[in-house]
Image (tube, rainbow, N blue to C red):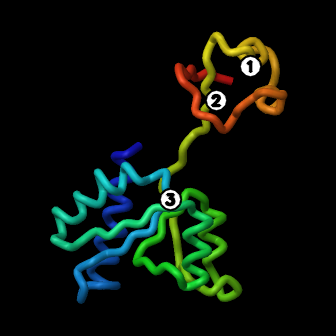
Amino acid sequence: MLRRIYPLVCAGLLLTSTTARAETQTVSVLYAGSLVNLMEHGIGPAFSKVTGSTFQGFAGGSNGIANQIKGQLRRGDIFISANPKVNDSLTGDANGDWVSWYVNFAQSPLVIGYSPSSRFAADLNNKPWYEVLQEPGSRSAAPIRNSIQKAP
């Protein structure tokens, strides 16, 4: 999937660098925190190497960054969120017309990982996952060591 993401994001960066801020040679990219590794270690350096322009990235929660854009606290040439609904909140006259267009270019499946020795393992094999995650003692937001991916 990364092979498909690189060209799309790089193309967007190239278009922006040549049109929006060619005079400064810096492209400011606001992006979802889940993309830090990809942007800072992959796309950002590759973009700078190919164009000679400076990649200036800022990571944060998609909603938080969108609110900062609306409040005119943060400005960027490109905004990459993890949720199309966040993009919608920046599109159109009623929303300040901050984003003129966007494209969905990737998605990520959600996976429930659990230890086979977990007290919830038997339930996860026999009950709907959403019921198990509501049981007392379930820590669905906590990091899970020794995770196993189970197909539905």
Residue displayed at 37% across by 49% down: 37
* CB within 8 Å, label 2 to label 1: yes
- Circle 2: residue type: Ile
Is 99 displayed left or right of 77 in the figure?
Answer: right
Label 1 vs label 3: CA separation? 30 Å
* CB within 8 Å, label 1 to label 3: no
| Depth order, front residue of 129/106 | 129
Label 2 vs label 1: CA separation? 9 Å
Residue displayed at 24% across by 89% down: 23
* CB within 8 Å, label 3 to label 2: no
Is 67 displayed left or right of 6 in the figure?
Answer: right
**Residue 8 placement: quadrant:** bottom left
**Residue 147 placement: quadrant:** top right
Q: Secondary structure at mark 2?
A: loop
**Which of the two labelled residues, at mark 2 and mark 1, occupies the earlier sequence position?**
2
**Which of the two labelled residues, at mark 3 and mark 2, occupies the earlier sequence position?**
3
Q: Residues within 10 Å of mark 2 (few under 14, many from 20)?
A: some
| Depth order, front residue of 118/89 | 118
Residue displayed at 66% across by 73% down: 89
Q: Which residue is mark 3?
A: 32
- Circle 1: residue type: Leu
Label 3 vs label 2: CA separation? 21 Å
**Which of the two labelled residues, at mark 1 and mark 3, occupies the earlier sequence position?**
3
Q: Position of residue 47 (x, y in %)?
A: 24, 63
The quadrant of the picture occupied by the C terminus is top right
Q: Position of residue 108 (x, y in %)?
A: 54, 44
Q: Secondary structure at mark 1?
A: helix
Q: Which residue is mark 2?
A: 112
Q: Position of residue 9 (x, y in %)?
A: 37, 61
Q: Which residue is mark 1?
A: 124
Q: Say above or below: 45 vs 88.
A: above
